[in-house]
Every structure is written in structure tokens, then in C-alpha cells.
Amino acid sequence: MNRPLGRVLGWLDEYLEYWLQFALYMYFALIIVVEVARRYFFGGATTWGEETALYAFVWMSYIAMARGVKKRSHLSVDLIRVKMNRSQLFSTFMLGDVCFIILATTVIIYSFPMLEMNLRYGQEMLGAELPMVLATASIPVAWALVLGRIIQRMLTTIAAFKRGDPITLSAEVSE
């Protein structure tokens, strides 16, 4: 791989979710502040502000899920795992990752009919004259990102196990 492309891909691997979350958070925080000020000072607000802020929050939440999966900091119970030996821990991680892959694939597959319906009927957001597909696309896009991070994390865990490195409960993919 050439060096500039490698640097870009490395940067995306490290910071994609962070900067997407940051941009979406800044957007919905700014919109909420503006809308509150408009209501307070002018007695009214836009119809699109609240709705687009809501969908930005939904996008941000789904992207945060991918970031949590990447860092293995998603919701989990580690009470039993801390007592496991290296092989048992590896096996539970692989089982968890396979289950996560099945879940992500299922969500992606079953989200496409909703997207197709949004596109076919030209549905728009209620308060904003924007295609509803911009909101509903968050599901397959974010779960595809999660699926990619799970596979990446799984490959990293397998490589660490083969090298004889310790298997830790929280793992950075980019180690």
C-alpha cells in the first residue's frame, strides 16, 4: 500500500468515529441552543431544527456504538471473564464476536426494506423537507461500521492469541 493512502486509512481507523461523533454532537448542540434562544426571544422556532437535531443524535448514538465495539468498551459483564484463563477468555471473545456478527448482519439485512420503502414513497421528515432516508440510513450504515469493527477486533484478537500475547478485557484495535 502506498504511504499517503496508508496514512489516510490509519487516520480513519483511529479517528473516524470520534470525529463523526464530535461533528454530530456539535450540530445538535448548536441547533438546540439556537432553537431555545429563538423560542425565548422570538416566541417561535423552526420546524426543522428539533427534528434534525434528534436525527443527528440518533446517528451519533449509533456511531458511538461502533466506537465502543472497536474499543471493546460496550456493555458487558466481566465478572466471570476476570477469573478465566487465556484460552477461555479467547473462546468467550470469539463466541461473543460471532454472535455480534450475526446480530449486525441481521440488523443490516432487515433494515433495507425500510430504506427501500422510504425511497420508493419519497417519505420526508415531518418538520424538515429532507428525505427520511437520511435518518433511517443510520441503521445499516452504523451497523455496517460495527460489523467492520467487530471483524477487525476479532482478527486482532486472533493474531494476539497466536502470538501468545495476553488477552485483555478491553482491547484497542489499533495496538
Image: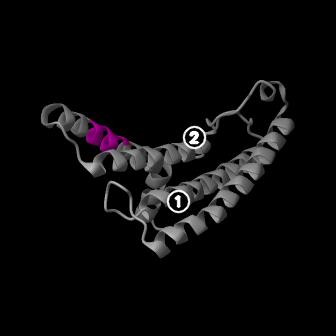
Mark number displayed over residue 68: 2
Side of 26 relative to 145 (left or right)? left
From the viewer's side, name the closer residue of 10 and 63: 63
Chain part drawn in magenta: 25-32
Q: Which residue: 81% across, 26% down? A: 80
- Membership of 61 in magenta stretch: no
Q: Which residue is mark 1?
A: 141
Can you name the residue that lies furthest to the bottom here?
Answer: 120
Q: Quadrant of residue 85?
A: top right
Can the viewer see residue 153 in this picture?
Answer: yes
Side of 82 relative to 36 (left or right)? right
Against 128, is 112 above or below?
below
Circle 1/circle 2 CB separation < 8 Å:
no
- The majority secondary structure of the magenta stretch comes to helix
Can you name the residue that lies furthest to the front here?
Answer: 43
Side of 81 relative to 152 (left or right)? right
Tell me if mark 2 has few (under 14), some (14-19) or many (20+) residues whose alpha carbon lies within 10 angstroms of its own: some
